[in-house]
Amino acid sequence: MQWIIRQETSADFRTVEELTREAFWGCMDNPTCDGEPLIVHRLRQSPDFVPELDLVAEIDGKIVAHILYSKGKILSSDGRETEVLGFGPLSVLPSWQKHGIGGDLLRYSLQKAADLGFRAVLIYGHPDYYPRFGFQPAHNFGITTPDGSSFDALMAFELFPGALDGISGSFHESSAYEITPEEASEFDRSFPPKQPASLLPITALTDRLPEDVGEAILKKNLPCVNSLCRFSVREMLEWEGMDEEKLAAINHVLEKLGRPKKLPAPPLSFQKKTVTVRKAHREDLPTLSLLATMLWEHHTAEELIMEFSNLITRKDAQFFLLYEGEEAAGFAQCQLRHDYVEGTTSTPVGYLEGIFVKENFRHHGHAAKLLAACEMWAAERGCLEFASDCEWENTESNSFHLATGFAEVNRIICFVKRLPTSQTKNINKTL
C-alpha cells in the first residue's frame, strides 16, 4: 500500500470537509464532532492560512487524510509578538487509520514548515499521540493559553534547535478556530444526515475497576471513556488517589474494552541530525554510484561509476549528495539541456536527470533540499526554467514534482516495433 502527499486544490475542498467530519465523528466526548469541518472551511478563507502547508494524502486517487496550518503568535509579557504556526485538524478517514498515514503526513508537513522558515508549531491536541513526533507540553517553554492556563494537551514543537529559547508567554491561535456550537451545528446541516455516535459512558470503565480506582476517575466528572484522551499520563498520576498501580488497572480494563491504553510520553527522540547537501566530487563516485543503483536497479555500480566519471567534471552537469549526520541518504543529478525541452520557452534549461532518497530517510523534506540545490546550480548558469520527467505510472514521483512547484505540461506514450528481418535485408539491398 502506497500513498502520495500533495497540496490540496479547490476541487478537493468539499471532499476534505466530508473526510474531516467522518474522522472526528464521535472520536472524543461529543457524539457528533466539535465543528472541525467548519474550522477547515474557515481557515482557508483566513489571512492566517498557509496554503503551502494545506496537504492531503491520496491512495489510488482517493483522498484519505488531510492537514492544514495557520499562523498564530506567542505574546510575551513585555508585549513582544513571535509568529508561530498551528495546525489542525489532522484528519484520517476511519477506515485508513492505524496505517501510519497521519504520521507520515505530519512528519512531511513539519519538515516543509521548517523549509519555509517557520520557527515552531503549537497545537491543542491528543497528549498521548503527538509526543511520538517530538511535541512537548508547551509549559516546558513557559507558554500558556491566553488566560494563563497550562495543561499537557497544549503542546509545542521546535522546527529547529533552540527555536523557542528566550520566548515565553501566551499562545494565540487563529481566530478561525473560534466557532460556537450553534455555528458548528448549522454548518453540519449542509452535509447528509448522520446518526450521532454512541459513546461509551465512563461507568463502563469505572464499574470494572476496584472501588478506590473507580472513585479516583469519577471525581473528575468525565462523561465518557473517550474523555481520558484529554489527559496525559503525567496529569492522571497527579489526580487525587491515583498512582502507577491504579493506572495499570485502568489500562487492563481499557484493553478489554478495545480502547487505547494510557502510556507515558516517550523520551524526546526527534533529535534531528545535521542534514547537509553538497556537490559530489570524483572521490565520491563509489558512494554516488551505490545510491544510484537503488534508483536505477538495472545498472551495476561499476557501470554507473564509468558513466558518472565522464559527467562529474563537465561544466554542464552536476551531482549533489545529501548526508544526514555521517550517512549518505540521497543524491540528485542535473544537467543543462540545449535542445528543445517539452513545455519550455528558453535555452539552456536545467534538467533533473535523477533524484533519490533512501526509504528510511523519506518524508523529511530531503528530496526538496536536493532539488533546491539543483535549481540554484541551474540558475547560476543563466537558466530561466527547470524541467524534469517521470514514468506515467510513478505516482510517488508525480506527487513529488507537483508538491515542489512543477507544472505538468504534457503526457506522451512512446511506441516501438521490431522490423521483420527480410524487410531489413531488402532495405539494405536497395540502399
Image (cartoon, grey):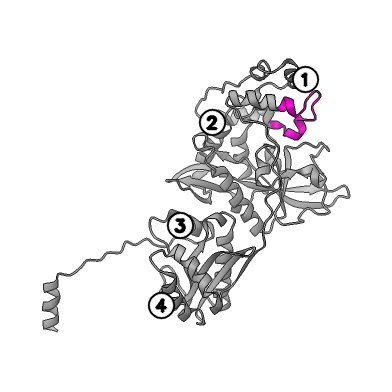
Numbered disc 3: secondary structure: helix
Of tags 1 and 3, the one toward the viewer is 1
- Marks 4 and 2: in contact by CB < 8 Å? no
Q: Amino acid at mark 2?
A: Ser
Numbered disc 4: secondary structure: loop
Mark 1 is surrounded, within 10 Å at the Cα level, by few (under 14), some (14 to 19) or many (20 or more) other residues, namely few
- Residue 388 visible to an observer of this rendering: no
Q: Amino acid at mark 1?
A: Lys
Quadrant hosting residue 201: top right
Q: In 3D space, how far apart are the residues under numbered discs 4 and 1 (Cα atoms)?
A: 76 Å
Of tags 3 and 2, the one toward the viewer is 3
Of tags 3 and 4, the one toward the viewer is 3
- Marks 3 and 1: in contact by CB < 8 Å? no
Q: In 3D space, how far apart are the residues under numbered discs 2 and 1 (Cα atoms)?
A: 39 Å
Q: Residue at x 73, y 46 (%)?
A: 156
Quadrant of the image for the C terminus? Answer: bottom left
- Residue 376 visible to an observer of this rendering: yes
The residue to which callout 1 is attached is: 219
The residue to which callout 4 is attached is: 339
Q: In 3D space, how far apart are the residues under numbered discs 1 and 3 (Cα atoms)?
A: 54 Å
Question: Residue 24's spot in the image, x, y percent?
Answer: 58, 32
Question: Residue 104's spot in the image, x, y percent?
Answer: 56, 48
- Tell me the magenta residue range: 230-247
Mark 3 is surrounded, within 10 Å at the Cα level, by few (under 14), some (14 to 19) or many (20 or more) other residues, namely some
Numbered disc 1: secondary structure: loop
Q: In 3D space, how far apart are the residues under numbered discs 3 and 4 (Cα atoms)?
A: 23 Å
The residue to which callout 2 is attached is: 190
